[in-house]
Amino acid sequence: MKNFALSINHDELKIGREIPLLLKLRLKNLFKSKAPAKGRILVIDTCIIGDFLATLPALRLFIENTGWKVDLLVSPPLKSLAESIRGVDRVFTAKSVYARRIERNEGARPLPKEYGHVLVLRISPDAYRLLDGVKYSSIRTYEIPFFKYFGHLVKNTLLKKDVKQWREINYEMIGMKEPRNRPGFNEIFKFSDEDYAGVSELPELQGSAKKIMLHAGSGWKIKLWENEKWIELVKKINETGDFRFIFIGGGDFEARSFSHIQENLDFKVYSLINRTDLRETMLVMRLCDYFIGIDSGPRNMAHLADLRSISMLGPAPKNFMPVNGEDIVIDKFDCICKSLFYLHKVSGMQKISADEVCDSFRKLSKVPGNALKPQPREAVCTA
């Protein structure tokens, strides 16, 4: 074991805190006084970006099929995006089980005292405390699909088989079958022409060059790609055509990484780090041409925004894969340690070269050889 090191993803361990909360909800519901069955639903989905985005096709179908007014309880960073979901009336906030630094919840509104029904897609201690003061006629929780899915992940990971996608399991949680045609971006969100016009005026989006969004940050160091490789990649792509590189993210780490990358380039790259919320970032994605990033929330946003992407995946069960077959994933992790911990000599991320990512970008842009010229993208639908 010499020269090997154990890295633990402490964030992923926190998901275990949801289990006793679910069991307490199940037990408490047996004795809780019931409210009249009114036509308003509270959906609780306090989780992180990638998990939340995976729930949206199923959530949208649930909202459409019930026809009732729906309030949504989400973690604070998701509020602006959640308010843009079709059929959502009011959005409330509570910290997720991860309680990350970005989850500041100042000025959060209390929940109404009564709901006809409650649907719990994800729970947290903060959400549980808020729900404790609410009367409702019925509640649906996710512990049975959750435990079944956990067993499926363990079994298929050990057998090195493909796993079900998390977005599929969310249909089980709402008690509906996955439709043949999943709701698309414009069926899920209610963005207007004015919304797109607002972000299109950002200085970072000006010019006729094809726009490439890049995301380099993660809360787990094993998922990070070296800054020097980002520098090499940007240089290589820049030599092949007219591109505008726009880095996104939030937090001090991403800001420092961008500064280092910019300082080591002899041409200008751009940053929206800490300058746009999730709603604005999603709109920007719809106006860009390509995305390149590591395994984190923004790459899941790119998949949902139908932005052609290259994702460099970390050690995880591969249960958040893109829907569009044109998107490219690069995965150098062949161990079974997956998302909770990683026993390594060299991180799989460091086995990915800038040349490999550049070659993948060449494939993504559908131009053979070295004469890389990005193809025009379909017009963005803002209906």
Image (cartoon, rainbow, N blue to C red):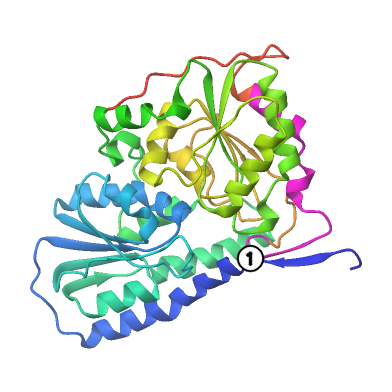
In this view, which residue lies farthest toward the right? 2
Tell how many labels. Answer: 1
Task: Specify the segment rendered in magenta.
Answer: 338-362
Please state if 83 lies on the left or on the right of 277 as rendered.
left
Q: Is residue 131 magenta?
A: no
Question: Does residue 256 lie above or below 72 as drawn?
Answer: above
| Mark 1, other Cα within 10 Å: few <14 / some 14–19 / many ≥20 | some
Classify the position of the C terminus by image quarter: top left
Residue at the disc numbered 1: 9
Residue shown at the point (44%, 43%) measured from the top left = 275
Question: Does residue 102 lie above or below 310 as drawn?
Answer: below
Looking at the picture, how far across and down is residue 39, in whole percent?
Answer: 10, 61
Looking at the picture, how far across and down is residue 106, in whole percent?
Answer: 32, 66
Looking at the picture, how far across and down is residue 293, in whole percent?
Answer: 59, 40
In this view, which residue lies farthest toward the top? 371
Task: For residue 383, say whether it is visible.
Answer: no
User: Callout 1, which amino acid?
Assistant: Asn
Please state if 251 lies on the left or on the right of 263 as rendered.
left
